[in-house]
Image (cartoon, rainbow, N blue to C red):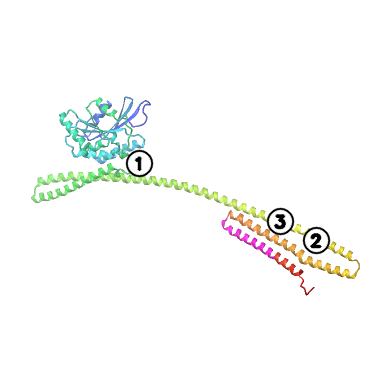
Amino acid sequence: MASVTRDTQAEETLLLIGVMGVTGSGKSTFVQKASGKSEVVIGHTLEACTQKVTPYDFHVGGYHVVLVDTPGFNDTYKSDTEILIDLADWLEVTYRRNVRLNGIIYLHRITDVRMDGGSMRNLKMFRKLCGSDPMKNVIITSTFWGVIPENKAVAHETELKDKSDFWGDMIEYGARVERFMGDRKSALDIIMELAGKPTVVLELQQELVDEEKPIHETSAGAAVNEELQKMESKYMAGLKQLQRETAEALADKDVQVQTILGRERERMEHRLEKIRDDQELLRQERREEIRQIEAEHQSRYSHVQSQYERVYEKQKAAAEVQRTEDRQAFREQMSEMHLKNAALEARLLENSAPRSKQKAGHDDSHRRALQEQTGADGSSREGSKVLSDDMQRDDSKGTTPEKSDRRAKMLEVGSALLSIAASGAMCAVNPVAAVGVVGGVIDLINIIGRRSSNRAGRKAAEQSDTYTSPGDT
């Protein structure tokens, strides 16, 4: 026996082929003739000799050939449900390992001049399992040539190919028909027809792996379940009929008939129990699949949630560090602004004091010069006194207060600018601080407006003081 892997010889190409068909169609004989392996068990009755999916490998013509012998759906010892699950397991494992079939050889006895229920059911399951597209890699092979007259065999082959319910629809999708003559050459010729074809993925493989369907919901699983329901209805109706016949036998006191009906009832009940076991097997498979999917989803969710929490905590810590740094920077900026504002006020005070002293000295010198010019003349001294009083009044009115007011205004403007700058720095930490910026700008505008108004008022007052009416003249 061979396990299907990619570990083939470097100069050989893997050729993986499934061998399918009803029980007694010659699957094991075909595999033995092609591989030359005597360990392949061949049945000589209608009882199945292949109980599980079994691959056999051999090397021929530069190919590593693996023929997969499979049990038929009308197996003697296994139900169709069990056969389907076995096939599904093998097909799923190989597909998940990225090993794909090169084709399928479907065997049918040419001696079966009539398609019985088992053959039709097996053919239906084969179609559901493969799907339409892989049919181009299917070779329908008739067996047991030479057992019946050739003309009858050819006629039967023609009927199978022409009717869509038999082989006709498969041929339309690309399947080919060949004859196995019972020797190795004939078997290898059929196998080599698949050597040049690309690999295929069966519909059951796509449903199980790509679509992640439970086997109960696949096309093949639905077909098996449909057959189970039909048989369940059949046996239920049969049991009801047996109950009526048993009641009649009891009324007639026919012991012999009662015994026969009792045995038949036990047989039907056993078959009905088996059918229900198969239905439960499909449902259990579905529930198990659902549990696996849920567990996988829960595992993925937990992993994603854990990653999210780690990222969130990391971002939260980084944000807290950034806020701390922003607050520290803001405090440093505010401290620096306070120092600059204090230095500005000191410079303003220093600059205003010398100018006041210089102006006062200039005014004293001017007064002394006037006094020297007027001499001792009383009227001149009187005029000088008036002039000095005017200068003092003028100095008191327009000079010192104006400078003092200017200094106060400059301090007020500087304070407003400091407030605006502080609010602007605060915006980096708290966007609501933008309201403070707007308020500071409004205060600065009001300060400038008041200064302009005061200056205009002083000019108007000066013009009023210097204006002389004609009467006064």
Q: Secondary structure at mark 2?
A: helix
Q: Say if 20 sits above or below 230 in the image.
A: above
Question: Which residue range is magenta in the image?
Answer: 430-454
Quarter of the rendering containing residue 146: top left
- Tell whether position 444 is magenta: yes
Q: Position of residue 367 (x, y in %)?
A: 85, 64
- Tell whether position 43 is magenta: no
Query: Which residue is denoted by mark 2 in the rendering?
Result: 359
Q: Secondary structure at mark 1?
A: helix
Residue contact at pointers 3 and 2, CB within 8 angstroms: no
Query: Which residue is denoted by mark 3 in the rendering?
Result: 344
Badge 2, how many Cα within 10 Å: few under 14, some, many 20+? some
Disc nearest the viewer among 1 and 2: 2
Q: Say if 393 sits above or below 190 in the image.
A: below
Q: Position of residue 425 (x, y in %)?
A: 61, 54
Query: Which residue is denoted by mark 1 in the rendering?
Result: 210
Mark toward the start of the polypeptide (3 vs 2) = 3
Q: Secondary structure at mark 3?
A: helix
Mark toward the start of the polypeptide (1 vs 3) = 1
Q: Position of residue 243 (x, y in %)?
A: 14, 49
Disc nearest the viewer among 3 and 2: 2
- State whether residue 347 appears in this view: yes
Badge 1, how many Cα within 10 Å: few under 14, some, many 20+? few
- Magenta: main secondary structure: helix
From the viewer's side, name the closer residue of 359 and 209. Answer: 359
Residue at 50% from the left image edge and 47% from the top image edge: 311
Mark toward the start of the polypeptide (1 vs 2) = 1
Q: CA distance from mark 3 to mark 2?
A: 23 Å
Badge 3, how many Cα within 10 Å: few under 14, some, many 20+? some
